[in-house]
Image (tube, grey):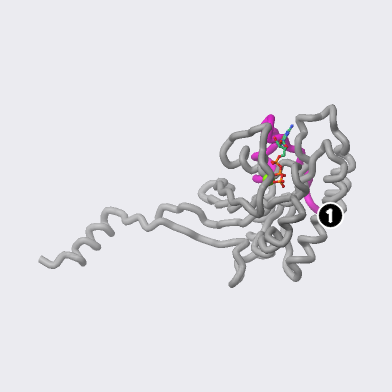
Amino acid sequence: MDILWQYQFRIILLGDSTVGKSSLLKRFTDGIYSDVADPTVGVDFYARSIDIEPGVKIKLQLWDTAGQERFRSITTSYYRNSVGGLLVFDLTNRKTFDHVREWHREVSEHILPHHMVYILIGHKSDLSRDRKVTRDEAEQLAAELGIRYVETSAKCNSNVERAFELLTRDIYELMKMGEISTRDGWDGVKSGLTAKVLYPAEEEAEREKSCNC
Ligand SMILES: Nc1nc2c(ncn2[C@@H]2O[C@H](COP(=O)(O)OP(=O)(O)OP(=O)(O)O)[C@@H](O)[C@H]2O)c(=O)[nH]1
Ligand SMILES: [Mg+2]
């Protein structure tokens, strides 16, 4: 059997408008970055696979939400079917950091009684001279929320792979421990898509079976 992916995780990007969610995703999925970016309208979709360990491929379905308040009624409907979330703030914009707790509360309450695996992202780390949030403060918030903290830059391609890989790995470990599992009516985690590849001997047998002469 040729395995395309063993698991599919749905991951959502959350945070205020202009923090850089779409840029982070474009860097991760297409390897591109632009200083000019349009605000997301509603929700956008991206995808990429990660080899988490030898022979185990995980397909990530990545939902990019609009940070603008006017799209909130659309974006909230995507919370429930996500297993992981990146809580993104802009290191050069204090307000976006102050709003992280609200994002965390809003999403967590919305998906009760279930849980999401989060990672806190301090983004635009290339703009170190304009920084308004210290690493210590961000690490303290992450510790309070019980989640990891990573500083990223889509512009300089710093820690982007690492952020997605750490979150994927955390979800994968929780799944292996049985803390997260597939559920009917929930698309956060799906398992197993394999391509049917016939080996020569099987192929021969199949051909003989179907031969009418
Ligand atoms: N310096 C710097 N600028 C960045 C970085 N990532 C994104 N930006 C810029 O920040 C601005 C907003 O980026 P977006 O990715 O559109 O932000 P967003 O969070 O998707 O915004 P919404 O779609 O409105 O929620 C753009 O001008 C980007 O070029 C980065 O790593 N470094
Ligand atoms: Mg966007």
Q: Which region shows up in magenta?
A: 146-165
- Left or right: residue 3 compared with residue 19: left
- Amino acid, disc 1: Leu
Identify the residue shown where x is 70% and y is 51%: 66
Q: Can the viewer see residue 53 in this picture?
A: no
Up/down of 183 relative to 9, above or below = below
Residue 165: give x, y in percent of width and height: 65, 45
Quarter of the image where the N terminus is located:
bottom left
Which quadrant does ligand 1 occupy?
A: top right
Instruction: List the single residue furthest toward the front.
Output: 70
Quarter of the image where the C terminus is located:
bottom left
Describe the element under mark 1 as helix, strand or loop.
Answer: helix
Identify the residue shown where x is 64% and y is 43%: 25
Q: Give the labeled residue for mark 1.
A: 145
How packed mark 1 is, by other alpha carbons closer than 10 Å (few <14, some 14-19, many 20 or more), is some
Residue 90: give x, y in percent of width and height: 79, 40
- Residues 169 and 131: in front is 131
Asked if the stretch drawn in magenta spans residue 107, the answer is: no
Q: Can the viewer see residue 138 in this picture?
A: yes
Residue 119: give x, y in percent of width and height: 75, 49
Asked if the stretch drawn in magenta spans residue 160, the answer is: yes
Up/down of 101 relative to 26, above or below = below
Residue 41: give x, y in percent of width and height: 66, 50
Identify the residue shown where x is 31% and y is 54%: 199
Mark 1 Cβ and ligand 1 under 8 Å apart: no
Up/down of 98 relative to 202, above or below = above
- Left or right: residue 4 compared with residue 140: left
Q: Quadrant of residue 34?
A: top right
Instruction: List the single residue furthest toward the left.
Output: 213
Instruction: List the single residue furthest toward the top.
Output: 129
